[in-house]
């Protein structure tokens, strides 16, 4: 009975060490990965969502602030053409 308990304890310690090592290696790899890797993962995820049957719209968090530029969003938000033109004129002075 004592030998079984010790063997189980050793097995759990070994499994925990292996898991810690796996997590450490993943974190090291992710730290070395560039932004393009994560963009690619995001694109792959969006592609899989697009193949689904739902009408869910998914946007990257970096693109959410661009929604106001969509004509339909402006219409829904009640932005008139004069305000839109002023925003466009104001934005044209900024360097891209």
Image (cartoon, rainbow, N blue to C red):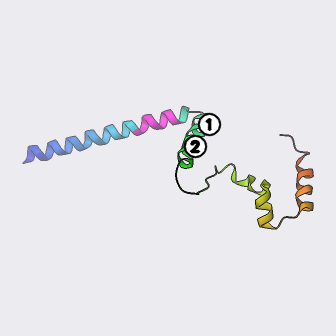
The picture quadrant where one finds residue 64 is bottom right
> With respect to residue 12, does 82 lie above or below?
below
Q: Nearer the viewer, residue 27 or 84?
A: 84
Q: Residues within 10 Å of mark 1 (few under 14, many from 20)?
A: few
Badge nearest the viewer, 2 or 1: 2
Magenta residues (range):
23-30
Q: Nearer the viewer, residue 64 or 8?
A: 64
Tell me if residue 43 is in the magenta stretch. Answer: no
| Secondary element type, mark 2 | helix
| Residue drawn at point x = 89 percent, y = 52 percent | 88
Which residue extends farthest left?
1
- In this rendering, would 49 be left or right of 59? left
Q: Nearer the viewer, residue 46 or 3?
A: 46
| Residue drawn at point x = 9 percent, y = 43 percent | 3
- In this rendering, would 24 be left or right of 90? left
| Secondary element type, mark 1 | helix
Q: Residues within 10 Å of mark 2 (few under 14, many from 20)?
A: some
Q: Which mark is residue 35?
A: 1
- Tag 1 or tag 2, which sits nearer the N-term? 1
| Residue drawn at point x = 6 percent, y = 48 percent | 1
Residue 34 position in % (x across, y down): 60, 33
> With respect to residue 58, does 28 lie above or below?
above
The alpha-carbon separation of the residues under discs 2 and 1 comes to 11 Å
Residue 62 position in % (x across, y down): 68, 48
Residue 31 position in % (x across, y down): 54, 35
Which residue extends farthest bottom?
78
| Residue identified by numbered label 2 | 42
Residue 35 position in % (x across, y down): 62, 36
């Amino acid at each position: 009975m004592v030998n079984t308990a010790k063997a189980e304890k050793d097995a759990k310690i070994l499994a925990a060490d292996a898991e810690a090592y796996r997590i450490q290696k993943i974190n090291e790899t992710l730290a070395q990965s560039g932004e393009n890797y994560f963009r690619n993962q995001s694109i792959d995820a969006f592609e899989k969502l697009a193949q689904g049957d739902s009408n869910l719209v998914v946007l990257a968090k970096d693109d959410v602030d661009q929604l106001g530029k969509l004509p339909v969003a402006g219409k829904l938000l009640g932005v008139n053409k004069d305000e839109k033109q002023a925003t466009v004129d104001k934005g044209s002075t900024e360097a891209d």
